[in-house]
Amino acid sequence: MARFLLPFVVALLVTSGVASINVMVFGDSYGDTGPTYHQVQKMFDDKGVSATVRSAAVGGTAACYWAGQDDGNAVVAHAKKLFPGLPDGPEFLWYTAGANDVWQSLDFEVCERLAKTWDGVLGCMKKLMSKVTGCTAKMLNKYFKEFPKAKVMQSGYDVPCYNQGCLDTFTGVFDLTFCAKNNTCNNQGMFDFITMYQGALRPLLPEAQYTTLFMMGAVQKANGVAGADVGKPVLTETANCAWETECVHPTYNKPSGNAWGKGFWDLYFSKHVQVNATSTNVVV
């Protein structure tokens, strides 16, 4: 009898072995240029967690661009497309969008150029963030309605490279006119933008499912900048330009990208997924 049961037992062990955690990345160039969704996959691989990470991120896209697609159902639609066999959707979503809304908003650009004080700049930013927050909340609330078991992590951004080539190109796109090329001022602008944006979103989304990470400073910590840590940037300093892709993105599998992967694990995924995760010890 045991001889006949053996194939069944082997098949059962194979089919009920390690469960794969499913993660979707949605939004802008942090998902497809640097550190990219590959960094999330590497993070899981390094920890021995079976995971499938897929991306719908497109560089240059803005939160309000995505919110204008399919009546705000863009995140839902991409989840169904990328994970068609999952009626509950992927367990996790890394949402990265909002930075491009800043430079794509003509109203903000005009307002900020006319600002006489930093409080004036922040007033312009607060007005813009009201719009961007609405765009993101619209999409994520529809996502939670469609997939009520899903969890969303929103990361923000990090300090860019400030060498001359970057100031003339990619980094310069995000510079505030008010700052007049002062890098410390522009870092403060990024800091305030992320803080304002994430702070406005938290009350609009379910606390048990939506988490924000303040990652700014991770690339500086990786570079040994004194006083820098994940969530604690040194605003007077730059990033290591050799570890940035297109000046503003932590490069995948460089110390900067790996710092983001480590931050994701330490601050978020380790709280939800155990090492060597199986179907019995995934804590979602």
Image: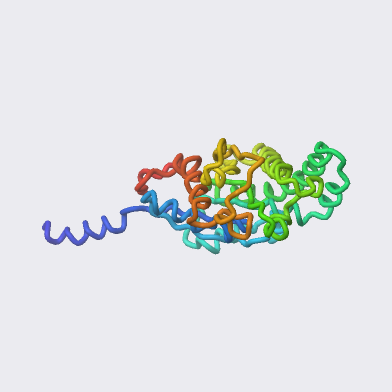
Horizontal side of 247 relative to 122 (left or right) equals: left
Image coordinates for residue 58, horizontal then vertical, percent: 62, 62
User: From what the image shows, is residue 215 above or below residue 170?
Assistant: above
Q: Nearer the viewer, residue 163 or 51?
A: 163
The answer to whether residue 220 of the structure is visible from this angle is yes
**What coloring was used for the rendering?**
rainbow
Image coordinates for residue 226, horizontal then vertical, percent: 55, 37
In this figure, what is the number of numbered marks?
Answer: 0
Q: Nearer the viewer, residue 61 or 145?
A: 61
Quarter containing the N terminus: bottom left
Q: Nearer the viewer, residue 54 or 117?
A: 117
Q: Picture quarter containing residue 124? A: top right
Horizontal side of 21 relative to 177 (left or right) equals: left
Residue at the (66%, 41%) spot, across then down: 236
Image coordinates for residue 13, horizontal then vertical, percent: 26, 55
Horizontal side of 98 relative to 275 (left or right) equals: right
Image coordinates for residue 241, horizontal then vertical, percent: 59, 54
The answer to whether residue 284 of the structure is visible from this angle is no
Horizontal side of 204 relative to 116 (left or right) equals: left
